[in-house]
Amino acid sequence: MCDQYRKCVKCGVSAAQDPFITFHRFPKIGNGKPETVLRSRIWAEFSFPNQNSADINFLKKLHSSHKMICSRHFAEFAFSNINKMRINKFAIPIDTEHILQRLQDEAGPTHHVEV
C-alpha cells in the first residue's frame, strides 16, 4: 500500500496530511511470549478500547490486516533511529502506563513482565 493512503487507526491521520509522519504495524503475536502478547494488548486497548484485547484472534488480525499507529502516539525514546522509521521492540504508545499496570495486575505477580 502506498504510504500516502495509510491511516492511523487511533487518530486517522494519513501521510498525505503530514509527510513527516511514520506508521507502525501492530505487533505480531508470534510464538505467544507473554511480553509480546502484553504489548499487543496494550496497542489494541489504546486503539480500540471497546474491543476484547484478550482475544488472540483479534490481536492476530490487527497485525495481519496491516493496521497501523502513527508516530505521533510514541515517545522519542520508542524509536530505534532518528528518522522514526523503526520502533524498538518494547515500544508502547504514550499514556498507556495505566493499561500496562491493569493488565499486569490481572495476570498476577507470577506473570509480571517488563515492556
Image (cartoon, grey):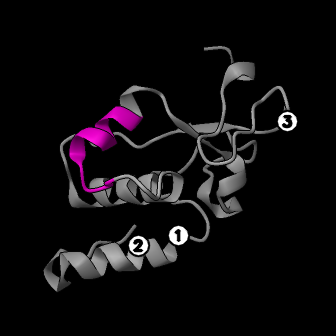
Secondary structure beneath label 2: helix
- The vertical placement of 81 against 77, above or below, is above
Asked if marks 1 and 3 touch (Cβ < 8 Å), the reply is: no
How far apart are the alpha carbons under marks 1 and 2?
Answer: 6 Å
Q: Which residues are magenta?
A: 52-62
Q: Quadrant of the N terminus?
A: top right
Which residue occupies 18% across, 85% down?
A: 109
Identify the main secondary structure in magenta.
helix
Q: Are marks 1 and 2 in contact (CB under 8 Å)?
A: yes
Label 1 vs label 3: CA separation?
24 Å
Q: In the rendered structure, which amino acid carries the disc numbered 3?
A: Asp
Q: Do the CB atoms of the residues marked 2 and 3 lie less than 8 Å apart?
A: no
**Does 90 sit left or right of 24 as displayed?**
left
Image spot of residue 90 (x, y percent): 45, 58
Image quadrant in which you'd find residue 53: bottom left
What is the number of the mark on residue 96? 1
Q: Which residue is mark 3?
A: 18
In space, the residues marked 2 and 3 are separated at their CA atoms by 29 Å
**Residue drawn at (36%, 56%), measured in percent from left and top?**
41
Q: Which numbered disc, 1 or 3, marks the residue that appears first in the sequence? A: 3
Tell me the element at label 1: loop
Can you say whether 19 is above or below 79 in the image? Answer: above
**Residue 31: x and y, percent?**
18, 42
Q: Quadrant of residue 83?
A: top right
* Rendered view: 79 above or below 58: below
Label 2: few (<14), some or many (≥20) within 10 Å? Answer: many
Q: Amino acid at mark 2?
A: Leu
* Residue that mark 2 sits on: 100
Q: Residue at x 40, y 43 (%)?
A: 27
